[in-house]
Image (tube, helix red, strand yellow):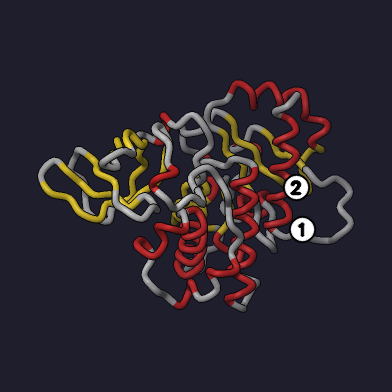
Amino acid sequence: MAIPASTVADTPHLRERTAKIGVIGRASAIFRVDHLLIYRDRKTDQTRDLKFMELILSYLATPQYLRRRLFPITPDLRYGGILPPLRTPNHPLEASSRKLRAGEIRDGVIIKSSGNRSLVDIGVERPALLASSHHVSGRISVRVKSISRDLTVETVRRRDIPFYWGFQVEATTRTLDEAAGSNNFDLKVATSRFGNSISEETEKLTRRWSEAKGILVAFGSPNEGVREILSRRGCNVEDFFDFVVNTMRDQGTETVRVEEAVISSLSAFNLLTEN
């Protein structure tokens, strides 16, 4: 999913900026977004907004028991406490090693490493032992092997986890046309109030969606839609996207906020996958 850096540009107060990004992150988790891309959509320097959005979303995506190790105290996280809990599988609430199960997967952070042994904080009262060396403070996903005398784990690759494991965040200085022009996607969908009604595209979109391995869904900013953003770059939206769809036909408001568009559109696409 791609959202613009100017998503928070019209929201001056830090608390409201944090809350807005929290809604987007929560919606991303509900509808199983794997990768959240924040792209540059203006000619002006957007470094500040890019870094802020990346920080808040990365903080939200990180299990609570790892946040203190991975995120130093910073003014931008002042209102981190208002962010909604994700309750995704990689955000477990259990904090007792006695209640862990062999085969359970958890995210962790390397707290000590020497030779071919590492200690991993996986959110319980004692560190887990990993039989390999890793960079200290590095984040890692592990599978519980034993919980008897020693708590032992083994590494597991994200792509081998058989269920949804939250979203990853990337802030880029690339523009939307540059991101959409990559070869990483089998299907690219732009949301726009000037696009075709999603009901008109249901049959074709459902077929393409079921066949695609990599899907990009792009959203515009509070002040400009995807078509306008690309037009300023001298680009036509149809040259970069397979579908341009309106998921909120006959909207009753002049504008739709980014977080509102994300919830509405992802909900509509989720229904398509059930056909």
Placement of 149 over or under 173, stated as above or below = above
Asked if one can make out residue 194 in the rendered structure from this viewpoint, the answer is yes
* Residue neighbourhood size for the residue with mark 2, other residues' Cα within 10 Å, grouped as few (<14), some (14–19), many (≥20): some
At label 2, which amino acid type do we have?
Ser
Q: Position of residue 96 (x, y in %)?
A: 42, 50
Point out the frontmost of discs 2 and 1: 2
Discs 2, 1 touching: Cβ within 8 Å:
yes
5 sits left or right of 150 in the view? right
Q: Position of residue 77 (x, y in %)?
A: 48, 72
Q: Nearer the viewer, residue 32 or 176?
A: 32
172 sits left or right of 219 in the view? left
Residue at the spot x=83%, y=33% of the render? Answer: 199
Which callout, 2 or 1, points at the residue further toward the start of the chain?
1
Residue at the spot x=77%, y=23% of the render? Answer: 203
Q: Secondary structure at mark 2?
A: helix
Q: Position of residue 46 (x, y in %)?
A: 49, 66
Residue at the spot x=19%, y=39% of the render? Answer: 132
Which residue lies under the disc numbered 1?
Answer: 256
229 sits left or right of 64 in the view? right
Q: Which mark is residue 146?
A: none
Q: Secondary structure at mark 1?
A: loop
Q: Position of residue 209 (x, y in %)?
A: 64, 27
In the rendered image, which quarter contains the N terminus? top right
Which residue lies under the disc numbered 2?
Answer: 264
At label 1, which amino acid type do we have?
Val
Asked if one can make out residue 178 in the rendered structure from this viewpoint, the answer is no
